[in-house]
Image: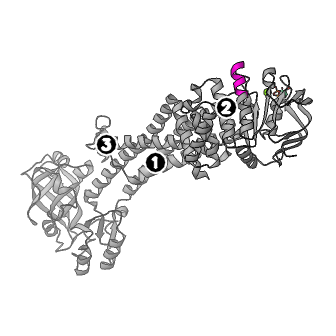
Amino acid sequence: MEHTVLCRNVSKVYRQDTVAVQALTDVSLEIPRLDFVCLSGPSGSGKSTLLNLIGGLDRPTGGEIYVDGNRVDQMEKGALAELRLRRIGFVFQAYNLIPVLTARENVEFVMQLQGVAAGERTRKAREILKEVGLEDLENRRPGELSGGQQQRVAVARAIVSAPSLVLADEPTANLDSKTAENLMQLLRHMNREHGVTFIFSTHDKLVMEFSQRLITLRDGRIVDDVRRD
Amino acid sequence: MSMLKAPLLLTLAWRNLWRHRGRTAAILFALALGVWSMVSLAALSRGSMEQQLVKAILNLTGHIQIHAPDYRDDPVVEHRLSPPGAALTAALSRPEVTAWAPRVRVPAVVASERESAGVTLVGIDPARERGLSFIPDAVTEGRYLESTDEAGILLGRKLAERLETGVGRRVVVMSQDVNNSVADRGFRVVGIFDTEPQAAEEGYVFVTLASAQRMLKLGDNISEIALMTTDRDRLDGLLAALRAAAPDLDVQPWTVVEPLLVLTEKIVNVILIVWYVIVFTAMSFGLVNTLLMAVFERTREFGLFQALGMPPRHILGQVLAESCILLAVALALGNLGGWLTVLALKDGLDLSAFAQGFEMMGVSPIIYPALRAGDVTAANVLVTVLGLAASLYPAWRAARHVPVEAITRV
Ligand SMILES: Nc1ncnc2c1ncn2[C@@H]1O[C@H](COP(=O)(O)OP(=O)(O)O)[C@@H](O)[C@H]1O
Ligand SMILES: [Mg+2]
C-alpha cells in the first residue's frame, strides 16, 4: 500500500518557561494516497500541532514522520522548504494570501517559486480559478474578496502546482455554514479530480460529514479512527 | 534560480512600499534630503576651494616656478638667475605651457612725500603676464603698464591710500642692488589695482622688468620664471623636462611653493568625509528603523512565505529589494536636487552679508559651486553600499524562522 503520510509514535511537547505542555502523545498513523481525512477533536486536542508537524512547519519531540516516503522530522531546512514547495499545499484558517498580490498572482506565486514559465503559469492559474468559480475576480487583491472567496483562492493556490498532499487547518472556521459546505465540496472535488490527498481539521460536525475517514483526537492522542465510505 | 525570482521580489517590494505611502514618502524625503545635502555641500566647498586655489595661483604663484637654488629661503637680489638658455626655452615651449614670464621680485621700500611702506617690488614683462597672474586684469584706475621699459609703477589701492598718493603722482622705490648698495629710483604712478587678499593689495608694487633690472644693476638677470600649464594636477612630465633643461636651478610646482593650498584641499576632503559620515549615519538609522517596522508588521506574511516553501534567501532578497528601491529613488531625487541647487547658484552664492572677514582671509564671499564627479560618485557609492549593508539586519530578521503559531494564529 502506498502511503502519502506515515507517522510513528509521534509526540510533541511545548515548553513555555517552566511549564511543559504535552500536545501530542504517541500518535501513529498511516494515510494512503488519495485519502480525504478529517482530524476532529475539541479545541486544544492537538489537531493543528499534528498538521504542522506533517507539513514540516515544526519538529516533533519524538517519533518519525514520512511524507511520500521522505523523512520529514529530521529533514534539513532547505530541503523542507523544497518539499513544501513541490509536494505540500497549505490552507490555513485565515490570512492565507499575500495581501499585495492579486488573486491570480497569489495562485501563480508558488509556480513562480518553482520556476514555471510565465505563460504557462498564467494559463494554469486562470484554469484553476475558473474551477473554483473565481474567474471574474482574478485581478482583485485579498482585501477586496470575501472570506469564502479568499479560502477558494487559497485552495486554488494549494492545488495548482499538483502537490501530493494538501493540509487544511480548520479551513471553514471563519465561514458561515453554507459557504463552509461549498468549500468542502470544492475540496472533495479537488481530491477526486486532481488526485491529491487531503487532511483537514475541524470541530464542526457538518464539515466532518464530508470526510472519507474521520480521526478523532483527544488530549493529544488518537481516540477514534473510522472509515466512513 | 535567483535571477528568475528578481521580478517577483521587486514586485513584492514595490507594492509593499505603496502599502504605507506616508511612511515611504517620509523616509524617501529624509534619504533624499541627506543625499542632497551631501552633493550640495560638496559642490559649495569644492567651489570655494577651487576659487581660492585659482586666486592663489594667479597671485604670482603660477603652476611652476623656477628660481636660483637659494631664492625660496631668502628671496633677495643675490639669488638670481640668467635669462633662460636654449634648452630651458625649448622646455618652456612645450605645448602644455600656456604662458610663462620672467620676473624680478625683491624686497623694497616705497615712499611718497608723506609715508613709506615695505613692499615686494615686482618687475614684469606686461604682455607676458596675461594669462599668468592677476595683475593685467586688476587695474581699476589709471592704466596697466604698456611698454617694456617705461618708468611707470602700479600700486594696490590699500597701499596708495596708506601712502596718500594716487595716479599721476610720483613715488620713490628703494632696494639693494647687486653690489649691496642702496638703489633708489622715482616712478610715476600710472595705475591702481584692486585684488584679494588684502595682503597682495598692500604688499606688491609692479614696474616693468627692464626698469627693475636697470635700477638693481641686474643686467639681463631675473629672480624667477613663473609658468602656467593646461593642467595643474599633471605636472610631473613637464617638471622633469624643465629640471633636465636647467639642472642647477630650483624648479618647483605650486604644491611645493604654496603648501598651504594643498592643506586647504586636504581640509576640505576631511570636512566632506565627516559630513558624509554624519549624514549617512542619520540616514541609515531612519532606513533601518523603517525597514524593521515593515518587517515586524509583516511577520505573519514572512511566515506564510516560509510555509509556501520560499527559501530564506528570497525573503532576505525581498527586504533588500525594498531597500534598493528606496535608496535608488532617494539617490535620484537627492542628486537631482543637488544638481538643481548648483544650477540655481551658478551666478554665485553671496555670503558677504553673513561674514565680513572673508575678504581678509582671501576667501571670496561669493561662492560658485563646483560639482565634482568624484564627490558625487563617493556620495552615491557610500549611500548605496552602506545603505544595503545597514538593510541586512532587518532583512535577516525577516528571513529568520518564523514560529508556526505566528502563521496559524487567527
Ligand atoms: N506554541 C505553543 N506553545 C505552547 N503550547 C502550545 C503551543 N501550540 C499549541 N500548544 C498547546 O498544545 C495543545 C494542542 O494545541 P493545538 O494543536 O493548537 O490544538 P487544536 O488545534 O486541536 O486546537 C494545546 O494544549 C495548546 O495549548
Ligand atoms: Mg487548531
B251 lies above or below B119: below
Q: Nearer the viewer, mark 2 or mark 3?
A: 2
The magenta-colored residue range is A173-184
Badge 1 and badge 2 both on one subunit? no
Viewer-closest of A63 and A118: A118
Residue A74 horizontal side relative to residue B196, left or right:
right
Structural crowding at the residue carrying mark 1, measured as other residues with C-alpha within 10 Å and reported as few (<14), some (14–19) or many (≥20)? many
Q: Residue at x 36, y 55 (%)?
A: B261
Q: Are marks 3 and 1 on the same chain?
A: yes
Q: Which mark is residue B379?
A: 1
Q: Nearer the viewer, mark 1 or mark 2?
A: 2
Q: Are marks 1 and 2 in contact (CB under 8 Å)?
A: no
Which residue sits at x=53%, y=49%?
B385
Q: Position of residue A8 (x, y in %)?
A: 91, 41
Of tags 3 and 1, which is closer to the observer? 1
Tell me the SS state at disc 3. Answer: helix
**The disc labelled 1 sits on which kind of residue?**
Ala
Residue that carries the numbered disc 3 in the rendered image: B358
Query: Mark 2 — residue?
Result: A96
